[in-house]
Image (tube, helix red, strand yellow):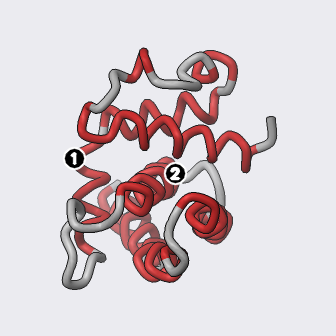
Amino acid sequence: MNRHEQRKKIFQILFQIDHDAVKLEEAAFYDLISDYSYIKDVVSYYGSNKDDVNVHISRYLKNYTLERISKAERNVLRMAVSELLLQESPPRVIINEAVKIIKLYGDKDSYKFVNGVLKNFPELLEEMDENSDGKQ
């Protein structure tokens, strides 16, 4: 399974466990976590850092709250921000993949919203890198 397909499964897992609708162990595609380290890494990162991920997303929402955006948009953003914070793939690739996925699962213009929120994250990551370099 290529990385794009893995991201689609990550999104589908996060979508199911949103608001504890389904327990992680009961989610469709849960078995893929043991087969694909990237799926495991991103889902585990989100599970362990849910509050931080949500805070990062909320910073870039203009006139919205996380609960006011669609479930598809919310979980694509959670997936992408978790990946961005893991820093295992280039930010441009992660953002492009998030836009592709929301085009599949979101509303007609959801991709514009997701892209608009995520476009600020590469700058955030640069700031985080600069701050961590300065502290060492």
Position of 80 with respect to 45 (left or right) is right
Q: Nearer the viewer, residue 4 or 125?
A: 4
Residue 31 in the image: x percent, y percent? 59, 16
Which image quarter: residue 3?
top right
Q: Is residue 123 above or below residue 104?
A: below
Q: CA distance from mark 2 to mark 1?
A: 15 Å
Of label 2 and label 1, which has the lower sequence position?
A: 1
Q: Is residue 2 above or below residue 77?
A: above
- The amino acid pointed to by label 1 is Asp
Task: Name, please, the residue furthest toward the right.
Answer: 1
Residue 47 in the image: x percent, y percent? 34, 33
* Image quarter (top left, top right, bottom left or bottom right) of the C terminus: bottom left
Give the class, few, some or many, for how many residues have Cα within 10 Å of label 2's Cα (few <14, many ≥20): many
Q: Nearer the viewer, residue 37 or 74?
A: 74
* Image quarter (top left, top right, bottom left or bottom right) of the N terminus: top right
- The amino acid pointed to by label 2 is Glu
Task: Name, please, the residue furthest toward the front.
Answer: 108
Residue shown at the point (63%, 61%) measured from the top left = 104
- Circle 1 — which element? helix
Residue shown at the point (68%, 19%) measured from the top left = 35
Position of 55 with respect to 48 (left or right) is left
Q: Nearer the viewer, residue 123 or 3?
A: 3
Give the class, few, some or many, for how many residues have Cα within 10 Å of label 1's Cα (few <14, many ≥20): few
Position of 119 with respect to 71 (left or right) is right
Residue shown at the point (44%, 79%) measured from the top left = 113
Disc number for residue 81: none
Q: Which residue is mark 2?
A: 83
Disc number for residue 51: 1
